Image: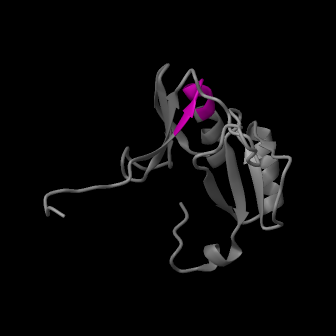
Amino acid sequence: MNENLKIKMYSFTVDCTDPQELAKFYAALLEWEMGFYDEEYAWVYAPGTNQGTYPCILFQRNLAYQPPVWPEEPEAQQQTAHIDFAVTDLERAVEHAIHCGATVANAQFSDDWTVMLDPAEHPFCLCLMKAVFASAHFGLL
């Protein structure tokens, strides 16, 4: 790679019909800050960081957005990606997510994580990751 070229992950972009509302949900869920927003875009980022220091979650307006079906079904809209969040207390994290506006997905496949749906029905997972938190290699803000 060219030594003058720098590539850094800037954002994880999520399609939705209302970027500001979905950004508010994730800001509340993660206790992050909401950055710039307008009718087309909104983003959230870790508190105390500058834009671009860490990747943000960017919400992009797409009026043709169709929520994915979870779990997958033939001929239905499929998820293309989802976000996993590491948590220390799964039960409390699920309660917090529900308080912020998420719902628990009907189908669950493990006792170690819970599949949730955000207000735009994107799946995301709350993952009980005690071993990861205890690792010296894991940095949690």
Where's residue 75, x and y in %?
71, 38
Q: At x 71% / y 36%, what residue is drawn?
A: 121
Q: The magenta stretch spans which residues?
A: 14-22
How many marks on residues?
A: 0
Whether residue 127 is situated above or below residue 68 in the rendered picture: below
Where's residue 102, x and y in %?
76, 40
- Magenta-colored stretch includes residue 130: no
| 108 left or right of 5 in image | right
- Of the 4 image quadrants, the one containing the N terminus is bottom left
Where's residue 42, x and y in %?
49, 31
Nearest the viewer among 33 and 56 is 56
| 65 left or right of 69 in image | left
Nearest the viewer among 62 and 8 is 62
Q: At x 53% / y 25%, what residue is drawn?
A: 62
Whether residue 100 is situated above or below residue 92 in the rendered picture: above
Nearest the viewer among 109 and 74 is 74
Residue reaching furthest to the right: 106
